[in-house]
Amino acid sequence: MQPRALELLRRALNNTQAVFRDGQWQSIQGLLERKRILVVQRTGWGKSVVYFLATRLLRDQGAGPTLLISPLLSLMRNQLEAAERIGITARTINSSNTDDWDQIKEDLQQDRVDLLLISPERLANDAFRQDVLADIANRVGLFVVDEAHCISDWGHDFRPDYRRITRVLQALPPNVPVVATTATANDRVVADVISQLGDNIVLSRGPLTRESLKLQNINMPSPAARMAWLAETIPTLPGSGIIYTLTQRDAERLTELLQINQIKAKAYHAGIPNNEDGTSAREAMEQQLLNNEIKVLVATVALGMGFDKPDLGFVIHFQRPASVVHYYQQVGRAGRAVDEAFGVLLCGEEDDHIADFFIRSAFPPQDHVSAILGALDQTDGLSIPAMQRELNLRQGQIEKTLKFLTVESPSPVTKIGSKWHVTAAAATYRVNQDYVDAIIAIRREEQAQMQAYMTHQGCLMQFLAQALDDPNPQACGRCKNCNPDLLLSEGYNDALANRAALFLKRSYQPIDPRKKWPAANIFAHYPFGGSNIPAELQAAEGRALSLWRDAGWGQLVASGKHETDHFADELVTACAEMIAQWQPDPAPKWVTCIPSQRHPNLVPDFARRLADALHLKFVPCIEKVRDHQQQKFMENSYQQAKNLDGAFQVNLEPKAWSPCLLVDDMVDSRWTFTVAAALLRQAGVAAVHPLALALNSPRMD
């Protein structure tokens, strides 16, 4: 059997000289013997080879189709090409190919599919479980769990839908071979995964050290300095590579700055829309990087597990990841099939703040759970939009809480059609706070471990290997601490840094006008009916000077709001410069502002000084006539708009008024600007251009 397997390996890899890596054939052989195997091997070792070759050999013996559960369907294209070369017919059922589902179901029934790929989220779909899974459950020839660390509550990337996998396992015949694969699991996670996969698990575990990778840490808190260093260093690095950022906005801004410096860069994150023809823009960028048509992808974790480019020359982190596991997984993408590759970790002043955000938002709090269960208990079921009208929770908070609850056993909620309902379990359900606290404690430990790595004086690769419980960690001899002669320069050009700082200060943010109310006839005090906001009541496009607490002007805005209760003159000058570049059309002829009862002088004082700088008249015509909760405490559009009902009145004589600037310190949901602009337009103002000092938008993925 091994000679046949070797022939298939060479055909799959399109390499007549290929040989099995240590542990690959042994894992395949174990699956042919109907064993359950956990494969923990470094990125690029060839875990997909194991389950693709096992699939081909098992199918040749008459076994049923392989069921592969993976969160990476969109990133498995090159692996599937290898599978096709050995005659494997692979199909997938996902939200992007609904037109093909009926044919795929028929092919499965007729045993014309060798391998079915699904995401773990597909297991939550009742129709899939009833129409597809129930039909093939007794015929599955091999069960594969890709990225198996996601099963573990203690893993760095736990996903609630992975909890369903153990239920599927329990429903399979006991003689079905199972393979679970991961590149990133320490002893704690390995033990947890093994406990969930069942008894008699065979563990295949290899070394983590990548011999070609040169690791280096550079403490560079200033974003402008990091941008300057990257602009100067990237052109000198071998091949093409990846820069990881923690937020979408950093990916976008860093990409723009690199492009300004004549570096072929593209931004890659979950918010990238598809192309106009419906094709995937992210897929196109992955292919450009694979073909070395661009120098660098600036990416969030959206480009994570599953992306395989053996000749990747460098991976650089613009900010410090949350855990050693995240870092190893990402930096390990470099240097798989080249003699030299660089893994550089930059450290920023914003790192801890971003890590804290992710830790705080990882689990739904008990008050969200109680609010949702309470609302459902009082009704005959609610859709998610209906819950937003009933509850002061964001759509994302509601969806996260419901997903968390659906994988609990027994679940306190169930979905029938578009509506969610409580079950009998809801009466006694409480979040297991001890469990949540234990997970959060682990995340804090991981954060501290990354902080320690940043300042570690010994071998950096050995530190990573020890943190991931590699059984035989060794000094690499190639990192900054082992061999300083191999260092990249840590200096940067002051002129470049100054230009980067200026670039950050000119990273103006558009404020798009809202065109619909969150619901029809939402207001009792204002005559704004219907769902659509008439064009004659809409705001014009606006601008925000900065991102809240961000490099550029964001820190100075935050200081003025929370420390001095006064916005500095530099912000007046910066806004005047922004307006000169923006050139709002039609041009504003006067300035007004949003009033506040909590800070009555802060924004009016700034707006008055801005009007003086622009040689325009300041008209404080908007009056606060009803106190309401602060908008920052309103969590969704319905609650945010409803909270403003009757809050303002415009004291203008009804007539034709020239265009104006409408000033506020912060913009988040845009509803304050939307309502105030509608009132101004109703009073006869020709155009209303919103202007905010800062945009509060923590886009983190």
Image (cartoon, rainbow, N blue to C red):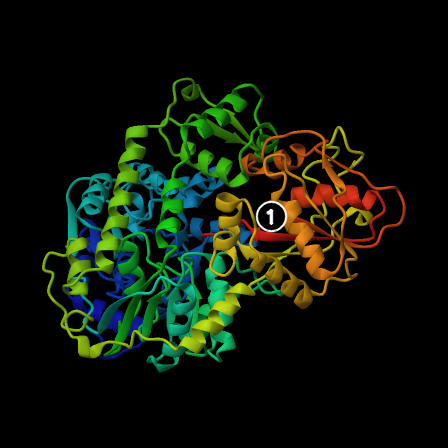
Residue 262: x and y, percent? 49, 80
Residue 415: x and y, percent? 51, 31
Task: Identify the image quadrant of residue 640.
Answer: top right
Residue 87: x and y, percent? 36, 66
Element under disc 1 = strand
Residue type, label 1: Asp
In front of the other: 678 or 419: 678
Residue 143 is at least partly visible in this image = no
Residue drawn at the location 48% of the way across and 45% of the way down: 563
Label 1 packing within 10 angstroms: few (<14), some (14-19), many (20+):
many
Residue 690 is at least partly visible in this image = yes
Q: Report the number of discs.
A: 1
Vertical comparison of 187 with 645: above or below: below
In front of the other: 435 or 12: 435
Q: Which residue is mark 1?
A: 665
- In the displayed structure, does residue 414 sit left or right of residue 442? right
Assign the N terminus to one quadrant of the image. bottom left
Residue 283: x and y, percent? 48, 66
Residue drawn at the location 44% of the way across and 27% of the way down: 367
Vertical comparison of 682 with 456: above or below: above
Residue drawn at the location 23% of the way across and 72% of the way down: 214
